[in-house]
Image (cartoon, rainbow, N blue to C red):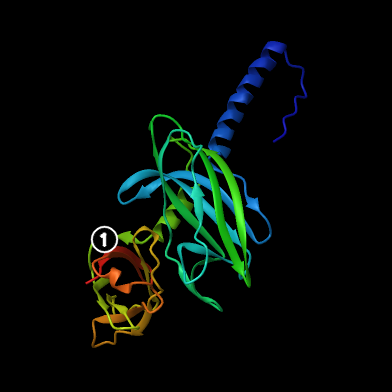
Amino acid sequence: MTFSFRNKIQPTVFIGVFVTFLSILSGYVSAFDPAVEGKWQGNEKSQLRLIAAKTEWLGQNQLFAGIEIHLAPKWKTYWRTPGDTGIPPYFDWSGSENLKSAEVMYPVPARFQDPMGMTIGYKSQVTLPVLLTAEDPLKPIKLKLSAQYAICYGICVPVSSSQNLTTNQGGVQRFAAVLSMALELIPKPMKQVKDGLGVELVKIKEEKGSSSITLNVLVPPSSKEVDLFVEGPNGMYVPTPKLIKKAENSEKTSLYKINLSDVDEPHKFKGLVLTCTLRADDLAVVQPCPVQ
């Protein structure tokens, strides 16, 4: 933006014009406030930045940050539960100011078959929404993020990134659409099967050397892309479930199986409440799955 004063202007007039210009510039900067956008950090394989905006979630307009990760072609990063091998991401918010809580949410991931086993994560790019709660809702939140995650393609490379960002509760909405789209990919929480989607029954079958967990899964009959991810409480390892029998038109449920042959003391699964994330095309839900 260039200003040229070609005519002679009295000092008082010039000061008035200059003050007006500063006022306009201040509004311009406010409209594109860098405080809601961190700087990209990384290299040609992976880059990360932090963004923020207010957007709707579960019927309420709430303040979110977003951890954006861009990956080079063929490279991947991991879900919070990485599968048979892999490293889960770690996000440290200590040092932030006026931050009561930061809940990192994960879009539905994909499976990848590696030489070492099945892994779970993301390729290309992913935005992780972070639901923010302030200690004092009337004051900005000063975020300080230390992120550690792994990226893999043939080999795995650890990545560290530090981000600082000050949110404005009244704020700039430049990234509202980005965060809204990311939230659309977050599995919706539910307690049981609803609208023909969910895990109906989880049972453990205990036999010497071949214990397993079976899961009866219900999805809409027209579903083409279906997958199931299962997590244990407090980071407990759960092998990746495998599809054993897909529901046909005459059947209601598909059958998944978790092989516990490599798990110490598989009988401890009985009575546990696992977390099941189920995807059926564009639908995704997360629900508690008590093991019978």
Determine whether, in the image, residue 168 is placed left or right of residue 56. Answer: right
Res 63 → quadrant = top left
Q: Which residue is mark 1?
A: 190
Q: Residue at x 62, y 20 (%)?
A: 19
Q: Position of residue 239 (x, y in %)?
A: 40, 73
Q: Position of residue 72 (x, y in %)?
A: 63, 64
| Residue 197 is at least partly visible in this image | no
Position of residue 223 relative to residue 86, above or below, is below
Res 245 → quadrant = bottom left
Q: Residues within 10 Å of mark 1 (few under 14, many from 20)?
A: few
Q: Secondary structure at mark 1?
A: loop
Q: Position of residue 223 (x, y in %)?
A: 34, 77
| Residue 82 is at least partly visible in this image | yes
Q: Quadrant of the C terminus?
A: bottom left
Position of residue 142 relative to residue 11, above or below, is below
Q: Residue at x 32, y 80 (%)?
A: 211
Determine whether, in the image, residue 175 is placed left or right of residue 44. Answer: left
The amino acid at mark 1 is Met
Q: Residue at x 42, y 65 (%)?
A: 108
Q: Quadrant of the N terminus?
A: top right
